[in-house]
Amino acid sequence: MVAHFNNNNISPTLHFPILSSYGNPCLDLFFHVLAPNVEAEDDSDKPPASSSYKYLKQLLPLAWSHNPLTTLKLICNLRDCSNDLGKSDEEAFYAAAFWLHQNHPETLACNVASIAGEFSQSVALMHDLVEILYRLLQGQDVRRRREKEKAAGGGNHNNNSISSRRRRREQVIDIAMAKKKLKSDTEKLKKQDIHEISSTSYFCPSIDSSTERATFLCESVARKIFPRDSSPEYRVVSEARYAYRVRDRLRQEVLVPLINALDYFDDSGTKACAVKKYLEDVKGGHGGGKCNIAAGALLPNDIVGYADDVDVGQVAELQWKAMVMGFKKQGKLNNCLAVCDVSSSSMAGIQNYMDVSVGLGLLLSQLSEKPCWKGKVISFSPNPELHLVGGDDLKSRCEFVRRMDCGGSKIDLHKVFDLILEAAVKGNLKTEQMVKKVFVFTNTCFEVANSGNDNKKSCWESDYKAIQSKFKEKGYEKNAVPEIVYWKLDMLAVPRRRPGLAIFGGFSADLLKLFVDNDGQVSPYHVMEAAISPKHYQNLAVVD
């Protein structure tokens, strides 16, 4: 199911023998430069942060030689926190950006608009551009050095000349672009289009900060927005006085109003609003009274989130039926079962993982063609049950799945296979009628979920042999034993494969689309591509 997750022919990589290469330095860069929030199979698979960053510096030139554009996207992915496939690792991102400036400065400069513009909508990278500039001017380890100096009660500072610092700033940040963004944001604020405002103002350095003193960023932007010839009073004052006045005007008239607007605006509901707007447009027929439903417009989790909505619940039902019909015509995912974790304690998070688990569980149950499996899901529990989902509509089916008894963070996979085997024997099913894949949707890592009530780690290989023996006793061959696909939704995990088991982690709309479009087949390459396929990556370009 997940090709090359643990290929025995994979050779040790560079100076880190505990890490195995995927045979593609871009995949190595994505999966082996591990941020603190990325899970490995065990501690031996995850090097210390310092080692990971050294490995990053070794991998960057190899990955760049293999595929420069993908490498550029992966550098930005180190900082991306827009979904669970992003690393959200500031230090790794800064180290990679520093390498990019040293080796491909034109590429870094060329992509500033994308990084601080569209890209910043998801990760607020204007802050990072300022930080990169600060480190270029003061040294890559400036933050650690400042902490040491502060602890020691003083210290030497980097006394780069003003002209040198301004030259270095211009290599990284296009001041005209910053001016354009701030002017555009000010116009949007006047129109009350607050949700369209970028984070540029929020991450401009404070006017009296050490970062501003090192970079002159705010002063340069202020000079662009309020040039000397824009006001008679600027023409008659000294250079220093002019700089002071325009900096203060930038703060009062531009930065403070924009920052105040951003502080009151919570963008966590932006996507939800877009989903509801689509459903409302369908309901209203775009003003023409005609209901136009695009089967693939929404994902399962998007739809179930509005199944009980008073305004668009009925439209969500129609959208769901159109989606299921579309998948049935494609003949995909038609012989699978889902194990759904609907525990409120484990499925909490910024993303609504409960909707993901419920939506995918219901989708797989309705796509199953065999009578023995159609309409059924399994509860994530130490004592799992095979449920025939009750209810006449999407709303009632969602409520049924959400009410299933899930016993915390444990799942007894032996009992899951027992349920499947019992149903197969009772239905007198042949091997070709057996369910082929069992997808587990949860936020609990596999080792914890499968450790048993005594929290002792079990040996999956031994467990799997015992499961195969049970099937053989009932007259089924090895190929009749379903494969477990364990999907940890809330965190990027290094993909791996064991006999009869594939494990991967992280969630995004793009990964979910790949999962469905590829009939449940997900490879490490698919995971990486899903991570760098969102819209804010697509304007990145390599120029040197």
Image: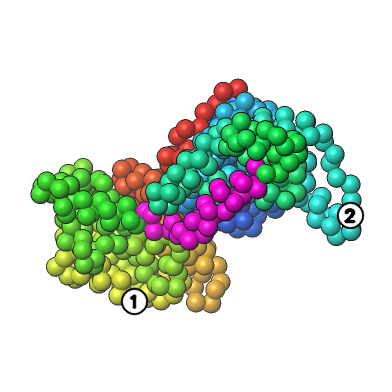
Reading the image, the residue beneath label 1 is 405
In the rendered image, residue 168 lying in the magenta stretch gets the answer no
- Which sits in the foreground, 537 or 419? 537
Relative height, residue 200 to residue 301 (above, below): above
- Which sits in the foreground, 292 or 253? 253
Q: Which mark is residue 154?
A: 2
Single out the residue that lies furthest toward the left: 289
Q: Percent from the top left, x then y, of residue 220?
A: 66, 37
Quadrant holding the C terminus: top right
Task: For marks 1 and 2, give the CA distance.
Answer: 60 Å
- Callout 2: SS: loop
Single out the residue that lies furthest toward the top: 544
Residues rendered magenta in the picture: 246-271
Q: Percent from the top left, x then y, of residue 30?
A: 55, 42
- Callout 1: SS: loop
Q: Percent from the top left, x then y, of residue 474?
A: 28, 64
Q: Which amino acid, mark 1?
A: Asp
Q: Residue at x 62, y 46 (%)?
A: 249
Relative height, residue 362 to residue 50 (above, below): below
